[in-house]
Image (tube, helix red, strand yellow):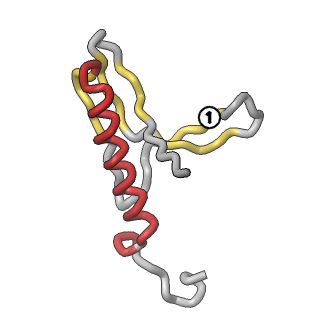
């Protein structure tokens, strides 16, 4: 709607995007706090111009419809295995 009116909010100023980034950072911090003993290396994925570059589709609860998701990072556990990390913030 704002774009149609010529009043588009730049990505940097988009409050919901900033809120999402802050929640994602909080999610990483909590993940590290909880699983610290099982992490050897943790890498956060970088974004180019605010666009997620690591997207994939997955099925949730065995449904036939695929849902878009983002790989937020990856880590190496204490057994030397690499694992993908998807941060999900659940609000109540």
The single residue placed furthest to the top in the displayed view is 79
Residue 59 in the figure: left or right of residue 33: right
Q: Residue 92 or 55: which is nearer the viewer? A: 92
Vertical comparison of 92 with 6: above or below: above
Looking at the image, how many numbered discs can be counted on the residues?
Answer: 1
Q: What residue is at 32 percent from the left and 39 percent from the top?
A: 30
Farthest-out residue, right: 64
**90 or 22, which lies in front?**
90
Determine which residue is flagged by label 1.
Answer: 58
Residue 85 percent location from the top left of the image: 41, 32
Q: Quadrant of residue 11?
A: bottom left
| Few, some or many residues within 10 Å of mark 1 (<14, 14–19, 20+) | few
Q: Left or right: 7 with respect to 35?
A: right
User: Mark 1: which secondary structure?
Assistant: strand
Q: Closest to the observer: 41 or 35?
A: 35
**Residue 27, quarter of the rendered image:** top left
Q: Which residue is painted at 28% across and 33% down in the image? A: 32
Identity of the residue drawn at 43% across and 64% down? 17
Q: Position of residue 33 (x, y in %)?
A: 27, 33
- Figure quadrant of the N terminus: bottom right
Against 40, residue 56 (above or below) is: below
Residue 5, quarter of the rendered image: bottom right
Q: Which residue is at a point 52% across and 89% down the rendered structure image?
A: 6
């Amino acid at each position: 709607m704002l774009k149609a009116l010529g009043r588009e909010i730049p990505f940097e100023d988009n409050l919901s995007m900033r809120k999402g980034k802050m929640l994602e950072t909080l999610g990483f911090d909590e993940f590290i706090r909880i699983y610290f003993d099982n992490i050897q290396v943790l890498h956060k994925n970088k974004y180019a111009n605010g666009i997620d570059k690591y997207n994939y589709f997955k099925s949730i609860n065995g449904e036939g419809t695929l849902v878009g998701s983002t790989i937020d990072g990856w880590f190496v556990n204490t057994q030397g295995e690499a694992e993908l990390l998807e941060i999900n913030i659940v609000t109540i």
